[in-house]
Amino acid sequence: MKNNNSKYIFILGILVMTMLYSCYKYKPLDFSVSKPDDVTAQEDIDAYPALKSYIDTVAYPDFRFGAAVSIGDYLKKGVMYRMVNRNFQEIVLGYAMKHGAVVQADGSLNLDNVNELIQAAKSAGVTLYGHTLCWHANQNATYLNSLIAPDIIVSDNNLLDMSGLKDGSFTGWSVNGATNKSVDAGTGQNGGKAIKLTSSGTAQNAWDMSMKTPTIPIQQGHQYVVSFNIKSDIPGKGRISFSSDLTNQYPWMDWMSTGTATEAFVTGSTWQQVKFTLSDFASGATSFSFNFDLGYLPNVNYYIDLSTLSVEDKDVSSGLDANLFANADFEAGNINGWSGWGNSSTRAASASGQGYGGSNFSMIMTNPSVVNSWEAQTAYDFTTPFQNGSTYKLSFYVKGSVAGSASASLQETTSYASDNFPSFNITTGWTKVELEATTTAGDRTRFLFSFGNYAGSIYLDNIALQREDPNSGTTTIEKTADQKKQIISDALDKWISGIVTDCKGYVKAWDVVNEPMDDGNPYNLKSGIGKVLTSDEFFWQDYLGKDYAVDAFNLARKYGNPGDKLFINDYGLESNLDKCKGLIQYVNYIETKGAKVDGIGTQMHIDINADSSKIIQMFQLLAATGKLIRISELDIGLGNNTQTANATAAQYLAQANMYKFVIDQYFKNIPAKQRYGITIWSPLDSPTTSSWRAGEPIGLWTGSYVRKLAYEYVAEAIKENLGKH
């Protein structure tokens, strides 16, 4: 039998040890670890309540502590939305209420986003300050400049009666099978008007939707060019058919210069030109009409650009310089100016009576045998080269002793580089030839007929070579200064009336005029004259004069609420006291003209090195006006464009002190009845991607919403100046 006494002794030992430990009382070790100073400091800052909670709204019911915010950030209703609502009484939009954001290409106002913002602010219980009505930057300058652009009068060779399309009545035009027809502004190729036609859901034949033109007068024997630009919202298809005045009412044509004639053309989302020439008119026809047959496919929206829709008589010369040939009809009985060579070819004036139409003379070129085309040539030399990049149109009457072909070109006389006209056919009866070529170099001085491949005699008459003048047929008429003033005055009225009327239910204060004073000449207004302006700059004062602010304040007063507070606002007043005085002087001028300015805004985009004595003097100057005074865009950098990554604790302390100093001096120097409020322009530090003070730690919070020392000092300033006492 096995002895187990040793096992029992071991177990008993374990039990005794367990009992002894269970009776032992824990005593903590006698040492501790203190928190790091920066953690304690941050906890102290975080312990402050929301900034606006310090404001005694009973004692200071009209004071507004505000923040600037982007409309996108606010409408997302995320962290920024909650932070702003918790800490501030009022919001200001940096861009979304400005002319450039609201005014569209056609001058209409799109206020949908602004109205959505108003509802969000109203629900959150924060007020909305209107910024800004009349400024030179962030404007829809393209639209404003288009209003005062010169009038371009184009000689109209268009034989189509466009009046019924221009006024949208379709008078003289017949539309069948369309579920919608309209002429809409802003839908054309360059923002102009376009015809909109919509095919039905059952359309499948060309004639299921059509638009017929008014009758177009013609002259027998002339050629007519029809052209227009067209597009559609989805793939479409169309053709042009004609009245019985043409011998072929349903021709296949090379509609879009593809090189192939087809029954129809196809359309898509980009503008395409349809262009063709007509000449096969029925005998005795004096007019014709045509149809846009666009019924091939269902539910297609077609757009036909009004500015490019035309029918022109190709045989009526327009837009061309004078004929370059001094001897073009040979009626003097000679071919002076013309020369030639090659293959024993000759050229001479014809016998009398052999000219076109029975006129006296023409030029005869004779080639005895077929060789390469360039081996028999007739030339006309010029001392001045043809203009590079210009289109030259060549026309003449020709017949030959036999049928054949020849060619023409513009040539440089050393290297023989040439720009060629298309070759032309020759018959035994007189025919008119019209060709064109565009020069590709500025050294061409010779015109050539090349006819080495034609054996026989060629008769030529009434030869014309004319440069197509891109400016011919147009007249530019500049608007007068008075006309521009009236146009821009009307545009200012339209803009201010539109936005102020729309927002007046909630917005009770506005920056009416922003940044009027010139930095270099601070007693004068800014001007854009003589400057290269950016795409969104438009200086209203350059067209309306010194009274532009008078007009703006009167309009804001007219369209707003009787009690609205209307401000003028500018920057740099704390660093340039002459600019501050100049602004005050301008306010006085505005009021001598009958307008009322309720308040002055000083932006105060400063840094820790700002001159404190000048800040005090600025507040004193502003206070002396008796106007409401608003710090409108306060942010404070660390100096020398210091970025967040390089900032020091000492700089952050200096920043906090400067924030408190500015706020304290505002309350010390501005009487209570004149204090409208203070707006923090950048609550968060500016990210490196920002267009405003990029990368600078200018806010009360970091970019990740951590409160900074500046928050604590601003909170203390608010508590001391606006809290309960």
Image (tube, helix red, strand yellow):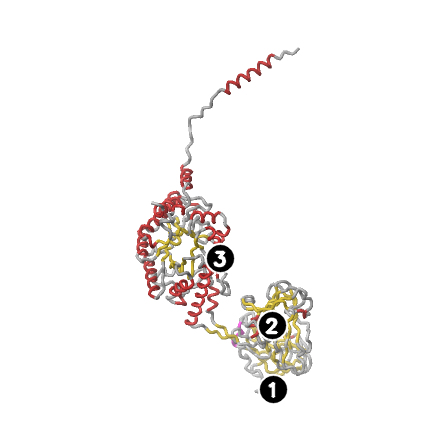
Residue 698's place in the image compared with 517, above or below, is above
The reply to whether discs 3 and 2 touch (Cβ–Cβ < 8 Å) is no
In the depicted view, which residue is nearer to us: 678 or 150? 678
Q: Secondary structure at mark 2?
A: strand
Instruction: State the residue position of label 2.
Output: 227
Q: Report x, y in % for residue 549.
A: 38, 64
In the image, 289 versus 490, the foreground residue is 490
Q: Position of residue 354 (x, y in %)?
A: 63, 87
Q: In the image, is residue 384 part of the stretch drawn in magenta?
A: yes
Main secondary structure type of the part rendered in magenta:
loop
Closer-to-camera residue (97/357): 97
Q: Between marks 3 and 1, how big is the CA–CA gap?
A: 79 Å
Furthest-top residue in this view: 1
Quarter of image, res 540: bottom left
Q: Which residues are magenta?
A: 383-387
What is the distance, in whole Å, between disc 2 and disc 1 at their CAs? Answer: 38 Å
Return the residue at label 3: 115
Q: Quadrant of residue 39?
A: top left
For the residue carrying disc 1, how many other residues have a C-alpha within 10 Å: few (<14), some (14-19), or many (20+)? Answer: many
